[in-house]
Image: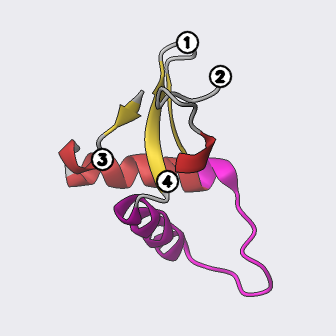
Amino acid sequence: MIIPWQQLDPETLDNIIESFVLREGTDYGEQERSLAQKVEDIRSQLQSGDVVLVWSELHETLNIMPRGQLNAGGHAPY
């Protein structure tokens, strides 16, 4: 189920994004990016609609994933 990020308290959204960034450990290439920069990157992707917040009822987890990975019903494929 997609969670509308706009309805979350800004501090809650920051914590969700920060947790996601720390969990993913994404490699940004030769130039290291700060946690704040990575959080801002994800926030921009949420604002543009490229990624969405998804709640998995099965796993009772919240994740951030590319919109294109959702199935036709708007749910995560797991």
Circle 2 residue: 78
Q: CA distance from mark 1 to mark 3?
A: 20 Å
Q: Nearer the viewer, residue 67 or 19?
A: 67
Residue that protrudes farthest toward the bottom in the picture: 31
User: Magenta part mainly helix, strand or loop?
Assistant: helix
The mark total stands at 4
Residue that protrudes farthest toward the right in the picture: 30
Q: Secondary structure at mark 2?
A: loop
Tag 3 near tag 4, CB within 8 Å: no
- The answer, for residue 66, to whether it is visible in the render is no
Kind of residue at badge 3: Trp
Q: What is the number of the mark on residue 72?
A: none
Kind of residue at badge 1: Leu
Percent x, y of residue 42: 48, 63
Circle 3 residue: 5
Q: What is the number of the mark on residue 58?
A: 1
Circle 4 residue: 51
In the rendered structure, the answer to whether residue 52 lies left or right of residue 26 reads left
Kind of residue at badge 2: Tyr
Q: Secondary structure at mark 4?
A: strand
Q: Secondary structure at mark 3?
A: helix
Percent x, y of residue 68: 59, 48
Kind of residue at badge 4: Val
Q: Residue at x 60, y 53 (%)?
A: 22
